[in-house]
Amino acid sequence: MSTFVQQVLNGLAWGSVYALIALGYTMVYGVLKLINFAHGEVYMMGAMAGYYVGRWAQKAELPMPLRLPVTLLGAMAACAVLGFLIERFAYRPLRQANRLSVLITAIGVSLLLQNGGQLVFGADPKYFPQVLSYSEVVNTGGVVLSNIQLVIMVTAVALMAALNLFVQKTRSGRAMRAVANDKAAAQLVGISVDRIISLTFVIGSVLAAAAGVLVGLSNPKVDPLMGIMPGLKAFVAAVLGGIGNIPGAMLGGRAARAGRDAGLGDRPLDLP
Amino acid sequence: MKTRVFGAVRVVAIGLALALAANAVMGSAARADDIRIGQYVSLTGTTATFGQSMNKGVTMAIDETNSAGGLLGKKITLITEDDQSKPEEAKTAAIKLIKQQRVVALLGEIASSRSLAAAPEAQRAGIPMVTPASTNPKVTQVGDYIFRTCFIDPFQGSTMAKFAHDTLKANQVAILKDVKNDYSVGLAEFFEKTFTGLGGQVVATESYSEGDTEFRAVLTAIRSKNPQAIYVPGYYTEVGLIARQARELGLKVPLLGGDGWDSEKTLEIGGDAVNGSYYTNHLSAEDPSPVVQGFIQKFKAKHGEVPDAMAVLGYDAGRILIDAIKRAGSTDGAKIRDALAQTKDFPGVSGSITIDADRNSKKNIVVLKIEGGKVKFQTSIAP
């Protein structure tokens, strides 16, 4: 029994990370009908940015409770810029091109970031600075829940709630839904489609950056190729939840992972 | 659309063919005053420190020979191809080195999976290949042109099994292996064979894949079986995280490993969690022998760091190859092969090296312990 509970907890924490990445896939697919294969690399860049900001926070001797928020915000800001640039220079010029060209471009951006990352950061893995010191929140009857796992779940839920509010309640959110529904009609009623697409990329990238930092915190090894597998698995989660469907992606990430860990914990297959 | 794509493919194909032809012509007309040795190594990718260390060792061996007057009156040119830590790229790199660069011999790889991918190409072309650190027995079974300058996994696995049973007094162990990696799977198998032969029991066998960062699920499953030690025959990239997550889940038993742990990164990423773990390796940096300490000094002066075992093995493999070419008196593949096969009592930094009938090396193995963030020498075992 304790093994089962432990596996569900493990799965929920790690599944939150997939859910955050899956959101970026699903949002971009919603507005552009594009599988953004570079998304896993945005997540990697988020972890890398977190690595540098976190190290700076340690060196500058910021008070401990401030280090995690600063690292998180720094990485999110860096990836917001990256997401904007990727959309502006890789995908926007291809807005009228056929979908295959855009898909191939996405793979190209992904390879560029993987190999560029190895060039700039070095190919060897790096130890992610511990901006939150490890402690156990629960340790009873063979079930361990760490503060890091708790932070992952809480941060993920908070970000998803914020996203939901944004998409449902704000003008930009409504515009985003309109673009997803019918790009031409949205343009006709005066929505700046390009601006909304940029915004979608920025938000998706910010969520991926948060996932990168959270993973750095719980599994403190970051390297330029770390985005490949999580990118694929989050893509599976997005498809599982119905790609283009935001609540679906949130659930898909967790269901996939918690299910795998609880049911298949003894024989992990290569599932998400 | 279809014809346009086809046209584009044709243009690219013709371009490639021209480039290849030009390269082949230039390759064969290569300056006759040098001896070309090729190496394919993982300078980038998941196990980059292996390739980077090996490259440093090989480069030192070749630079030393060149500054001492060269080989057979010629300079050695080292041609390096990066295989990005991927088996399929290792194969491509080997073909490129053999066909385009016309190397007389190949050095590589550290990882057994990549050596296994490239070795058939060397064998087919009749180009001798020396691997510094691929320990899986299958590598040299590819053919009579493939040699290695390290021990093999049956020895490495049985050493750790005996150590766990006799010294650590463990009767029940769990195994956590990288299921897609020839080295890891082989080592786990040899460990289990010896360990159960000694009367011990393997209570759980779990697996992961290279690149994974989340091991809590498999570790939780292992935890429920209460093992006294966990054998993790993987690479340094995963070991640190596995150790951390095991400790977080309350698994405090020692972790045991093989030479794939050999990298500074195990200590950096594992931190306190890898303390109290043991692994088998090719040599210890604490070895007081003047040969080892002399090499460490030389290496430090050049690269500003203490060499790991892969750097030392790269250096030894390079020197053995150079020695064989010298004894062969020729750069002919078959002659180099015969000279390599006759290597006897070569004074390597990692120990005295003799190539046996199976083209393997019989060498001592050391067991190391990680303690207080440092790697300490534990014991040395002769084959």
Image (spheres, coloured by chain):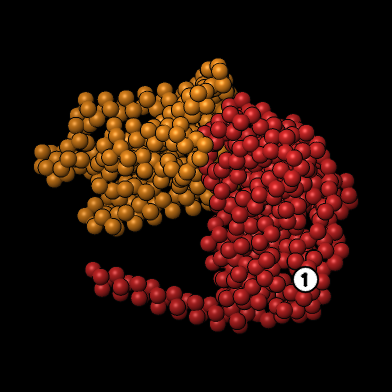
Q: Nearer the viewer, residue A31 or A143?
A: A143
Badge 1: residue crowd in 10 Å (few <14, some 14–19, many ≥20): many
The spot of residue A103 in percent (x, y) is 32, 54
Q: Residue at x 39, y 36 (%)?
A: A256
Colour of chain A as rendered: orange
Residue tagged 1:
B340
Looking at the picture, does residue A47 appear above or below residue B80? above
| Residue B177 on image: x %, y % | 60, 44
In this orientation, does residue A199 appear?
Answer: no
Query: Along the horizontal axis of the image, is B190 left or right of A248?
Result: right
Along the horizontal axis of the image, is A209 left or right of B90? left
Image point (45%, 78%), residue name: B17
Across the whole image, how many numbered discs are drawn on residues?
A: 1
Residue A79 x/y as whole percent: 40, 38
Q: Secondary structure at mark 1?
A: helix
Instruction: Say if B138 sits above or below B14 in the image.
Output: above
Where does residue A6 sit, x and y in percent of width and height? 50, 26
In the image, is residue B382 above or below residue A48? below
In-front residue for pair B127/A145: A145
At 47% from the left and 37% from the top, the residue drawn is: A264
User: Can you see residue B85?
Assistant: yes
Q: Amino acid at mark 1?
A: Leu
* Chain that bears disc 1: B
- Quarter-wise, where is residue A231 in the image? top left
> As drawn, is A121 to the left or to the right of B74?
left
Q: Is residue B367 above or below residue B12?
A: above
Split into 4 quadrants, where in the image is the C terminus of chain A? top left
Q: Which chain is red?
A: B
